[in-house]
Structures are given as structure tokens and as C-alpha cells.
Image (cartoon, grey):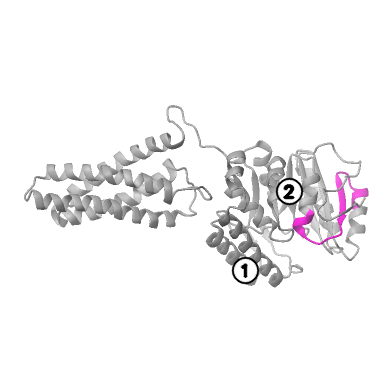
Amino acid sequence: MSVDVAPGQPGPARPGRRPASPVLEIVVPVHDEERDLEPSIRRLHAHLTAEFPYPFRITVADNASTDATGAIAARLAQQLPHVTAFTMAQKGRGRALRAAWTASDATVLAYCDVDLSTDLAALLPLVAPLITGHSDLAVGTRLGRGSRVVRGAKRELISRGYNLLLRGTLATRFTDAQCGFKAIRADVARQLLPLVRDGGWFFDTELLVLAERAGLRIHEVPVDWVDDPDSRVDIVATAVADLRGIARLARALTTGALPIGELRSRLGRGPLEVAGVPAGMPGQLVRFAAIGVVSTVAHLLLYLLLRDPLGALGANLLALALTAVANTAANRRLTFGVRGRDGAVTAQFQGLAVFGLGLAFTTGALALLGLWWPGASAATELAALVAANALATLARFVAFRSWVFRPKGATA
């Protein structure tokens, strides 16, 4: 059956013929899709019935269609078990998803585009980490390693450009904001949805940015994706709306209008605890000190090897540069728990700035030693380098923790 929902009101009452509290509810938002709706819903229903091992529900969310989409959706709800439908008077994919997800009693909430461009074989890998509690959100990615995509050069360029823009303006780490294949745990959705303002195509991006800033785990699934040549998305209007959404969201994040700190404390995952190693700053200090000892030993060995051919200052410069790169990479992963390639190059450039601080300490120590004690022995030079390295190490930890590897959205 079909149910009208007033804009801004809670989601629809469901038809009575549905499984109680399904594990998964997958929403298909539609607007004027009378041609593709029935074959797509029947195909999705057949796949879930045959391949999905948990109770499910499919909800067709018709948002202000002007053709026969609503009538077709209502008929499918009558004919197919575990299928429901409702109609909204106001257009907007984000509005339709908000209404359906808010009203749902499922454990995991998902959605897919009606054209089913994404291979449905990725559906179980998408939602499995959410069912187990391993992850909080899951997104299909057409831009990640392992994805297979068939689409025109224009859409490829727009998609990659949009995601690069997100990285540059909002410091995002997820690879594909607009793939119409996403899932979220219902308990997480209840916390985030009231903060998502967009009711159109930017809804996905806003939800993902909030989740990432809140410290939630986002699981990305490489998908096989074939472009729908009859897609009715207005690219220009969507791009303009997305740019406005980016500006609005960036302003809210910059001014503190969004309660990111509260979300992070309530929803974010805490640091990993290792037996015998304290968590938080004490744990970071232990790991940083261990890496620092190894780096210092490597620096001194390289210095001794390069001392004769390059001289004291040249040997120190090259040895410190080599160990600084390795030190930054090790601290990024082991001390501050940053994984993946995203931001690695930026961290190395910032690490080089920190390296300049260490170079100033150690080079200054050697220069002063040369002034005060000309002809000092190699052992004395090493002692001066050890003392200078100790000061540089303290400064490096402060810089790493408060600048280079400070979590996005955290206060200094």
C-alpha cells in the first residue's frame, strides 16, 4: 500500500504484512521511475530472497512522482512479501531516506539507486560489518582499488573532481561520497540524522562527513558499477547544490555550530588498549619513545658511516633526513594509529617541517661544539648529538601530537 507523509514529519506507518524487526531494511528512493521501478524491485527482491541470510525489508520511497511510480510501488507492496511503499509530497532523495530510516525498526538501514547500477553481489559484504558491529557505516566505492566501473569520461571526471574537492575543503578520507549504495547501523542513524540538514543529493556527503568527524568507522566496499545511460540526474543543478552544501557544512564545522566534540565522545571509538601499554597520551609516549630510540641509533650509525666522506654537518644533514622520513611514517602508524595512504604525503611534508626543528637543534649543537672545543673527539660529537636529539625528540612529540597527527575536528 502507499502512504502519504507530510514533509518534516516522522516516517510512514508500515503495511501490516512485514517481518517483525528485520535485520536489514533497504530503501529505494524514486522519482518518476515508472519504467525501471518494477523490474528493479523484482530483481532486488529475488536476490535478497535467494542470497541474503537474514530477514529483510524493501521499502520503495516515492518522493513526489508525477507519473505512475506511486501506483506501481503500491502494487508491488501488495504482490511481494517483505516489500512496502510510501509516497511523500515533497521531492528529495535525502528527505525520502530520512523519513524511511527514521521510521524503521531494522538493525541495519541501507539504500540503493533504483537503476541497480551496482552489482548486488556487493550487498552482503556491504552490510555484514554493520551486522557484526565491526563498522558503523558502509559505502560502496567506485574509486577504490578493486572497483570495476563502466561509465563515460564526463561522469568519471565529475565524480573524481567532486571527491577531490571534498578532500581539499572538508579533509575527508572516504573515496566516493555519491555512490548510490550505502548502509548505516540504526543506532548510529538515530544520532546523526537530526544533524543532517540537506534533503537532496548532498544528504550522503553530509552524513559521511559527520560520521567521519565523530570518529565512526566507515567501511568501504569496492563495487562493480555500470552507468545507467538513461540517468535523469541534472548534473549542473546537482553540482551547484553540492557546492552550496560544502560551503554550508564547512562554515558549520569552522564556527563550531555542529556538536562534533559531543558526537565524538558519545559515538567515537576509543583508542585500542594493549596489555602492558597504557592508553591515551601515556601510551603514545611509550610508543614514541621506543621509535625515538630506534631512530636515534639509526641516526648515529648513519652519521658515523657518512662522517668521513661528507664532513660532520653534511653527515648529520643526510642521516637526519633519512631517519626523519622513517620516523614520521612509524609514528603515523604505530604511535597515533593513522592507517591508509590518505594524508600520508601531507604528513611527510609536515614531518619535514618538524625535521627542520631537529636539524636546528643538532646542527646548532655541532656548530657550538666546534666553536667552544675545536678538534673535539668523535665521542664528544656523539654526546652532543645525543643531547640535542633529546631536545629535538621532545619538540617532535609535541608537534606530532598537536599538529601533524591531531585528529580532524579535535581542539588543539
Q: Residue at x 26, y 42 (%)?
A: 390
The answer to whether 33 appears left or right of 128 in the picture is right
The quarter of the picture where residue 119 lies is bottom right
x then y, percent, for residue 131: 69, 38
User: Could you tell me if residue 223 is visible in this image?
Assistant: no
Above or below, comparing residue 161 to residue 348 in the picture? below
x then y, percent, for residue 274: 47, 31
Instruction: Confirm or deny contact between disc 1 and disc 2 (CB under 8 A).
Output: no
Crowd around label 1: few <14 · some 14–19 · many ≥20 (10 Å)? few
Crowd around label 2: few <14 · some 14–19 · many ≥20 (10 Å)? many
Residue 78 painted magenta: yes
Q: Residue at x 78, y 46 (%)?
A: 102
- Element type at mark 2: strand
Above or below, comparing residue 33 to residue 269 in the picture? below
C-alpha distance separating marks 1 and 2: 25 Å
Q: Which residue is mark 2?
A: 110
Q: Magenta stretch?
A: 76-96
Q: Which residue is mark 1?
A: 158
Residue 200 painted magenta: no
Q: Residue at x 73, y 70 (%)?
A: 234
Q: Amino acid at mark 2?
A: Ala
